[in-house]
Amino acid sequence: NISISAGALAVERGDSFTEECFCKEQLALNPNLVTPPYDTEVKQICERWSLNNAKKYGMLVAGILAVVILNQVLLQIFTLFIDFERLGTVTEYTMSQMTKLFLAQFINTGLLIYFVNAKFGSSVPGIIKVI
């Protein structure tokens, strides 16, 4: 068990390992620890940790939603392209689908690697930084 004073000292020193350990321990005791207002001593100590975790999970959900939306958009675009081609057989139709799917996955993988490794800095709009 980590005491409240040790948790506060960890936050002061910037010891994120001890801070996380303390806050997880306190969260197990009090599930309301991560919800505002941060009016108790323990909540104030864990406020930064709570906000960072909320941001991390928010980004995770935003990424999942972006992938789902992109997949639906690609599905509609592929359907339009393949219908426009007016292919004669089911085999041609399926081959056309697979070719387009391969190209989309290839491009998406490249873009994903680029965006994950990009350092946007101050060029990212404020609302995206909040998310």
Image (spheres, rainbow, N blue to C red):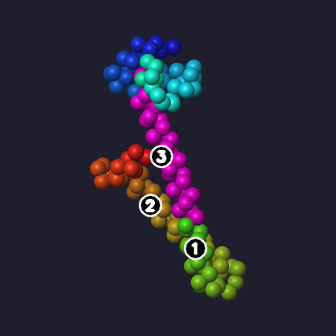
Q: Which residue is mark 3?
A: 59
Among the two numbered marks 2 and 1 on one chain, the one whose residue lies closer to the N terminus: 1
Q: In the image, is residue 52 part of the stretch drawn in magenta?
A: yes
| Amino acid of disc 1 | Phe
Tell me residue 79's x, y (percent).
Answer: 61, 75
| Amino acid of disc 2 | Gly
How far apart are the alpha carbons under marks 2 and 1?
Answer: 19 Å
Q: Is residue 14 left or right of residue 62?
A: left
Q: Which residue is mark 1?
A: 78
How far apart are the alpha carbons under marks 3 and 1?
Answer: 28 Å
Residue, x 55% and y 60% (percent of image)? 69
Among the two numbered marks 3 and 1 on one chain, the one whose residue lies closer to the N terminus: 3
Name the one closer to the observer, 21 or 48.
Answer: 48
Instruction: Judge the density around disc 2: few (<14), some (14-19), many (≥20) Cα neighbours within 10 Å.
Output: few
Q: Assign the magenta stretch its main secondary structure.
A: helix
Residue, x 59% and y 84% (percent of image)? 85
| Amino acid of disc 3 | Met
Instruction: Judge the density around disc 1: few (<14), some (14-19), many (≥20) Cα neighbours within 10 Å.
Output: some
Residue 18 visible in the displayed image:
no
Q: Which residue is mark 2?
A: 110
Tell me residue 129's x, y (percent).
Answer: 38, 47
- Per the rendered image, the range of residues in magenta is 45-72
Q: Nearer the viewer, mark 3 or mark 1?
A: 3
Q: Secondary structure at mark 1?
A: helix
Tell whether label 1 touches label 2 (CB within 8 Å): no
Q: Is 33 located above or below residue 88 in the figure?
A: above
Q: Secondary structure at mark 3?
A: helix
Tell me residue 73's x, y (percent).
Answer: 55, 67
Quarter occupied by residue 83: bottom right
Tell whether label 2 touches label 3 (CB within 8 Å): no
Q: Secondary structure at mark 2?
A: helix
